[in-house]
Image: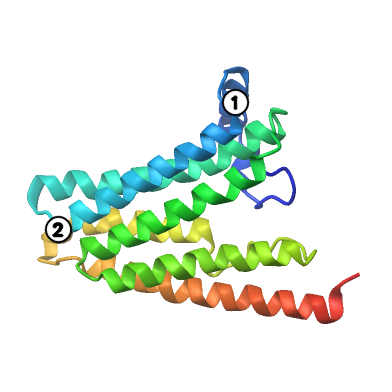
Amino acid sequence: MNTGDRRPLASRDTRWAQAAARRLAALSVTPNQISQASILAGALAGAAFWLGGQSDGMARLLLLPGAALFCQLRLLCNLFDGMVAVEGGKASADGPFWNEFPDRIADIAIMVGIGYGIAMPGLGWAAACFSVLTAYVRELGRANEAPSDFSGPMAKPHRMAVATIAALLSSVEFLWHGRNEILTLALAIIAIGSAATALRRAWRQVRWLRSERP
């Protein structure tokens, strides 16, 4: 886990998060293992979206809320790996790699899972590519010595919020005889929003390099 610039998160200052982080830090769990667990959470979310989008009845009612749960577990992994590394003093030399790589795998798994679940794999891959691009632009900025840019409109927490809400609503689409319209709309919002986020971050970085760099 990287101990440099960190995403500003209000949840990091809550009592429950600090207590959980202290508990994890006291165990033999490492920040890198928590980061790696986010790959599993992302893979399970993607699988649940894929299967849930193609299912009906009770299976759909279980799988899509499960996808929402795994999206949130992915975010919890992202929260606690940093807290255990920084506040728990357990950072490691290879932490920067594990801070970023699992997130990209999780993003791809979730977006592609939604895409195949709604029978629109192209849209899923587009959302996955643009999601990864937002992180690439941010890391490119860091390589250029610019401040880390976590701005939206579709940064990681926003993507997971949209996916989570869509999963929960889509699980009860049968109430109005719907069929994956909510997931389709959500995936389109994520794809377009992520593309806009990448462009916004790129523009902010170029502007900083041109005129605001110390």
Q: Secondary structure at mark 1?
A: helix
- The residue pinned by badge 2 equals 54
Determine whether 88 is above or below 129 in the image: above
Question: Is residue 38 at all visible to an observer of this figure?
Answer: yes
Across and down, in percent, residue 143 comes to: 74, 63
Classed neighbour count for the residue bearing mark 2: other residues with Cα under 10 Å, few (<14), some (14–19), many (≥20): some
Q: Is residue 89 left or right of residue 45?
A: right
Does residue 129 appear to the left or right of 47 in the view shown?
Answer: right
- The amino acid marked with disc number 1 is Ala
Tell me whether circle 1 and circle 2 mark residues in contact (CB < 8 Å): no
Q: Secondary structure at mark 2?
A: loop
Instruction: Choose the circle earlier in sequence order: 1 or 2.
Output: 1
Among all residues in the image, which is located at the extreme right?
Answer: 214
Residue at the location (45% across, 61% down)?
159
| Residue at 39%, 72% in the rendered image | 126
Look at the picture and state if 92 lies above or below 189: above
Q: Quadrant of residue 72?
A: top left
Report which residue position mark 1 lands on.
19
Question: Compared with residue 190, is residue 3 higher up or lower down, i.e. above or below?
Answer: above
